[in-house]
Image (tube, grey):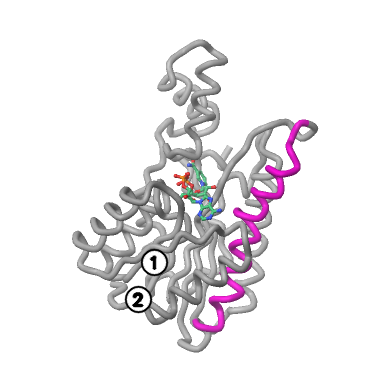
Amino acid sequence: MLNGKIALVTGSTSGIGLGIAHALAAQGCAVMLNGFGDHAEIERARAEIETRHGVRVMHHGANLIHPHEVYELIEWTCARLGAIDILVNNAGIQYTAAVEDFPHAKWDAILATNLSAPFHAIHHTLPFMRRNGWGRIVNTASVLGLVASVNKAAYVAAKHGLIGLTKVVALETAGSGITCNAICPGWVRTALVETQFQARAKQLNVSTEEGAHQLLGEKQPSKQFVTVEQIGQLVVFLCSDAAAQITGAALPIDGGWTAQ
Ligand code: NAD
């Protein structure tokens, strides 16, 4: 369905981003991976996507906290793969503490990674998309872009901001063949949330599994984790022709979390 398209997925060396990269590659997209991790593991993941789906896959380790590295990533992707048709701003980090205890450096890092990096990536990528008259921008927000939760001031602020940015870009690109949407997952079992499960387990003196299910049950009525495969398929749909008139939306994929 997306044969010959070129996708950049930030934060795709693990978790949700890796799932999105697999899903787009399965539809025929060449993919630029981005993110941190063990060099050999990243190479194994890159080679696996390439051989399984028969598409070109590369990796760039830009640290998106730095705007100039976001720019280098965009330039490098266009130089090596030819263009960027699909931009998935997915890289994100988390830190939990009450507002009065929240370290300034953590606030700055979360805002830089979760909000400013998508701005810089969109800013540099849009001219390439406009030249082609087609583009898909998908921002990985969160249910916490729609509702709040205690001890997550920076993350909630950044994800609400990302949904605002999504709407502005959608309006500025409306009718141009380019769409911009946000996806809003509930709990997904990845490295990002594991420390929260461990902390809850410690607090209750139960196993990590029990801690995870306690937190899941509090917020997500389905009491089932969202999977990275389900999120990958949502992104594929947003990249399809059927979704050409979906723009500026913030789509929950959250087992009912935000219906409450
Ligand atoms: P993860 O920790 O598995 O993945 C995060 C990815 O971002 C990794 O590839 C990591 O290397 C990369 N990354 C982090 N900082 C970076 C930086 N400065 N520069 C470049 N890459 C960087 O976590 P995940 O759960 O897969 O998170 C992916 C996205 O999904 C995040 O934006 C997160 O906020 C969002 N999200 C996650 C959940 C969840 O329950 N896991 C729910 C809603 C939204």
- State the image coordinates of residue 27 (x, y, percent, origin top left): 28, 67
Q: Amino acid at mark 1?
A: Met
118 falls in the magenta region = yes
- State the image coordinates of residue 127 (x, y, percent, origin top left): 56, 83
**Residue 48 picture quarter:** bottom left
Element at label 1: strand
For the stretch drawn in magenta, the main secondary structure is: helix
Residue drawn at x 37%, y 77% as measured from the top left: 81
- Viewer-proximal residue among 5 and 231: 5
Residue 54 to residue 228: above or below: below
- State the image coordinates of residue 145 (x, y, percent, origin top left): 62, 49
Q: Give the spatial CA distance, label 2 vs label 1.
A: 11 Å
Question: What span is in magenta?
Answer: 101-128
Residue drawn at x 63%, y 48% as measured from the top left: 146
**Residue 3 picture quarter:** bottom left
Residue lying furthest right in this view?
A: 100
Q: Amino acid at mark 2?
A: Lys
Residue lying furthest front in this view?
A: 39
Residue lying furthest bottom in this view?
A: 131
